[in-house]
Amino acid sequence: MKILIITIAVMVFITSACSDTFLVGRYEHNYFWGNTSDAMYEMLCPSGALKKVLSDTRLSQAEQESLYAYNCIERSSDKIRRSYASMTELERNDIKNAFKKNNFAINVMAVYDSECATSGKR
């Protein structure tokens, strides 16, 4: 069990070190910011969650509208990543904190433990 946890921790560290964005998610569903999958779209767009997250940042209205459009209208991974890359460290932290404020997990990967799943233990 310790080996599994250490392996997962190392994988998360390596993945986050190689990524140009961050993981965002709810429950066991985590995606890199900039992922344009249907699942990421469903998590952020129809519910209005992304609009709420962006409104909780200090980004300009124009930046908020652009990020919303890149994620929910155009669904452009490249534009999302370029926008994030152009942000200052303060702006990057601001958007991550806004996700956290709205009950999203940041840079967390769910671990599935088959022993717990079959035994009913948590």
Image (spheres, rainbow, N blue to C red):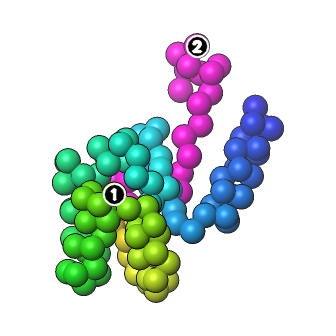
Residue 82 showing in the rendered view: yes
The magenta stretch spans which residues? Answer: 100-122
Label 2: few (<14), some or many (≥20) within 10 Å? few
Q: CA distance from mark 2 to mark 1?
A: 41 Å
Q: Secondary structure at mark 2?
A: helix
User: Which residue is at 45% across, 54% downward?
Assistant: 35
Q: Where residue 75 is drawn, which disc sits there?
A: 1
Nearer to us in this view, 106 or 34: 34
In the rendered image, the residue lying farthest to the top is 119
Residue 117 placed where, x, y %? 56, 19
The answer to whether residue 35 is left or right of residue 44 is right
Q: Amino acid at mark 2?
A: Ser
Vertical placement of residue 70 versus 5, above or below: below
Q: Residue at x 31, y 70 (%)?
A: 67
Dot 2 or dot 1, earlier in sequence: 1
Q: Nearer the viewer, residue 100 or 75?
A: 75
| Mark 1, secondary structure of its residue | loop
Which residue is found at the position 67% from the left and 64% from the top? 18
> Residue 121's image quarter?
top right
Q: Please say if 31 is above or below 101.
A: above
How many discs appear? 2
Residue 92 % position (x, y): 44, 76
- Which residue bears the numbered disc 2? 119
